[in-house]
């Protein structure tokens, strides 16, 4: 019953039609939330006692770091769905999400490096968290490269899915690296079990930025997946009538 | 939220010397995200045109 | 299973270039490093183990580069699939053969060079065992990489799987520090033994699924 549910709602055609309706609202709401979060954080939040105003990069860096990992986690779920139920849409979503994931991981690395200069006096440190994020970025590139190397796209989808599932072991290592190894990186500002370790005047814009970034990346993912689906399915009748 | 952290716009840009780190990060990252949106949107439009032309 | 292992062992033993070549390259790299750097013996002893670790990583990748290529090209893989309907035993036997013929000597060479650069001879069994377990993990991982890019060249497989190898390197480095400081070795060793057993049992399944994809 579950597999018939998966197959019914996982056709690329249904996906494109459903997302077309929601895309304008998701993207606008995402941009708005991101703008509010950033303006609040940049202009209204007080200066940090230790880091001064350089801490304001947190409203970009932390959402980027969170979603760098979450996107890979999403890809691993899609990979499992593709491998188990052979759902084509899941493979299309992996490919689209990999591009978005690579972009946001780059932004996380770049923003973190710049933040490191006034905070630690260095733009790079071989500590666990930064190195793991760099590894994650290379993994995204590896997945994109692997898929692009095969002319048989169905084979490429399966191999990519296998690689994503194997690579997901790196995500808990990134998550726990701050706890497992002694490191220069500050520990998590927000945890599920212990709540936030930063003041509410900084926390609220951070949460808004995180939600805004999430919706923005979802809208980017929808756009990217739409392009990829139309490319892969361009010879199908539904695409001909859709355009 | 009601109290501005900076008294003037120049202070807001300067951020006690940290503006040189904060602003490039936000500007470049926003540029990357917007570029991604625009590139994909443009590619979709090109693909639609290509499919329509192929259909005749 | 024993028969498959024996046949793979004898096949690999005959291909001198495949197993002896990487070992000689490892020796060359470990000799070249001290020659290329002008530092005191004390400093060399502090950094030398990093070179051994990186050499292990490189040689593991080099050794497993075409592990399945010949069988794919000459049709042996298809034959195995037709007979067994599964590649598990075949992959396990192949990887274990590589570990025995290449991984164990690599661990030996690494141990010898670590003695030459300051590690006490009493610590050699620990160093050897740790390197052997790292090789077991690395060979499994790079065999997976080779299976992904079976006829597309080694670089693709490396790009795909090298990031996954780095946690193994971190673990190996931590293990060496525990030996040097004399505390916590048992914990790291337990982690490596557990990882080694887990990866050796699961990775052939994953490689098997990958090879099946290539044959479909």
Image (tube, grey):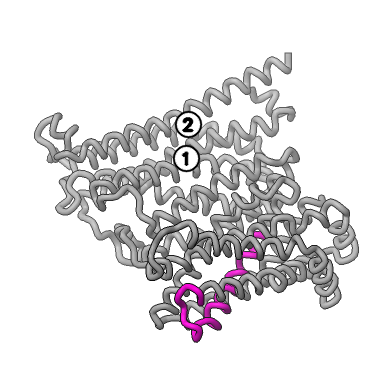
What segment carries the magenta color?
A: C115-143
Q: Residue furthest bottom?
A: C122
Q: In this figure, which residue is indicated by the disc labeled 2?
A: B36
Q: Chain for mark 1?
A: A
Position of residue B10 in the picture relative to residue A61 (left or right): left
Position of residue A84 in the picture relative to residue A55 (left or right): right
Disc 1 secondary structure class: helix
Q: Is residue A54 above or below residue A84?
A: above
**Viewer can see residue A121:** yes
Identity of the residue drawn at 57% across and 78% down: C128
Position of residue A61 in the picture relative to residue C202 (left or right): left
Closest to the observer: A17 or C108?
C108
Label 1 close to label 2 by CB (< 8 Å): yes
How far from the left and from the top, in percent, is residue C140?
A: 66, 65
Q: Quadrant of residue A83?
A: bottom right
Specify few, some or many for label 2: CA neighbours under 10 Å numbering under 14, 14-19, or 20 or more. some
Identity of the residue drawn at 50% across and 43% down: A102
Q: Is residue C203 above or below residue A74?
A: below
Label annotation for residue A103: 1
How far from the left and from the top, in percent, is residue A51?
A: 19, 50
Q: Chain for mark 2?
A: B
Closest to the observer: A14 or C28?
C28
Q: Main secondary structure of the magenta part?
A: helix
Q: Which quarter of the image is occupied by the N terminus of chain A?
A: bottom right
Q: Is residue C158 above or below residue A187?
A: above
Disc 2 secondary structure class: helix
**Viewer can see residue A209:** no
Q: Quadrant of residue A229?
A: top right
Q: Are discs 1 and 2 both within one chain?
A: no
């Amino acid at each position: 019953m579950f597999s018939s549910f998966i197959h019914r709602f996982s056709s690329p055609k249904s996906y494109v039609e459903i997302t077309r309706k929601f895309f304008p609202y998701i993207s606008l709401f995402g941009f708005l939330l991101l703008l509010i979060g950033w303006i609040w954080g940049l202009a209204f939040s007080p200066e940090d006692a230790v880091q001064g105003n350089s801490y304001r990069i947190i409203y970009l860096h932390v959402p980027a770091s969170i979603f760098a990992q979450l996107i890979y986690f999403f890809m691993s779920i899609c990979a499992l769905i593709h491998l188990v139920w052979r759902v084509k849409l899941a493979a299309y979503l992996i490919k689209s999400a990999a591009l978005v994931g690579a972009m946001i991981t780059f932004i996380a690395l770049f923003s973190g490096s710049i933040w490191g200069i006034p905070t630690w006096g260095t733009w790079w440190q071989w500590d666990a968290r930064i190195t793991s994020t760099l590894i994650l970025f290379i993994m995204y590139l590896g997945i994109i490269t692997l898929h692009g190397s095969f002319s048989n796209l169905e084979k490429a989808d399966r191999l990519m899915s296998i690689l994503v599932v194997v690579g997901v072991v790196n995500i808990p290592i990134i998550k726990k690296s701050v706890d497992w190894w002694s490191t220069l990186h500050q520990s998590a500002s927000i945890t599920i079990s212990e709540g936030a370790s930063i003041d509410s005047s900084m926390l609220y814009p951070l949460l808004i930025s995180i939600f805004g970034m999430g919706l923005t990346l979802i809208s980017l993912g929808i756009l990217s997946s739409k392009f990829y689906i139309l490319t892969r399915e361009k010879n199908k009748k539904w695409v001909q009538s859709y355009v | 939220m009601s109290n501005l952290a900076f008294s003037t716009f120049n202070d807001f840009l300067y951020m006690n010397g940290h503006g040189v780190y904060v602003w490039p990060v936000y500007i470049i990252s926003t540029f990357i995200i917007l570029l991604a949106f625009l590139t994909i949107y443009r590619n979709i439009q090109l693909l639609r045109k290509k499919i329509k032309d192929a259909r005749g | 299973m024993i028969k498959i292992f024996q046949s793979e062992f004898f096949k690999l033993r005959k291909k001198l270039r495949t197993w002896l070549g990487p070992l000689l390259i490892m020796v060359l790299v470990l000799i070249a490093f001290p020659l290329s750097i002008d530092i005191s013996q004390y400093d060399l002893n502090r950094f030398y183990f990093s070179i051994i670790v990186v050499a292990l990583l490189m040689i593991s990748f080099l050794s497993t580069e075409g592990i399945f290529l010949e069988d794919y090209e000459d049709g042996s893989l298809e034959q195995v699939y037709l007979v067994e309907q599964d590649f598990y035993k075949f992959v396990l036997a192949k990887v274990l053969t590589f570990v025995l013929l290449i991984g164990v000597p690599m661990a030996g060479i690494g141990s010898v060079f670590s003695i030459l650069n300051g590690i006490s001879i009493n610590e050699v069994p620990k160093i050897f065992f740790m390197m052997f377990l790292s090789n077991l993990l690395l060979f499994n991982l790079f065999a997976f990489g080779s299976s992904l890019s079976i006829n597309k060249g080694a670089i693709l497989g490396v790009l795909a799987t090298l990031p996954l190898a780095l946690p193994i390197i971190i673990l190996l480095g931590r293990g060496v520090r525990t030996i040097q400081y004399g505390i916590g070795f048992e914990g790291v060793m337990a982690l490596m033994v557990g990882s080694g057993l887990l990866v050796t049992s699961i990775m052939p399944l994953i490689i098997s699924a990958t090879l099946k994809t290539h044959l479909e």
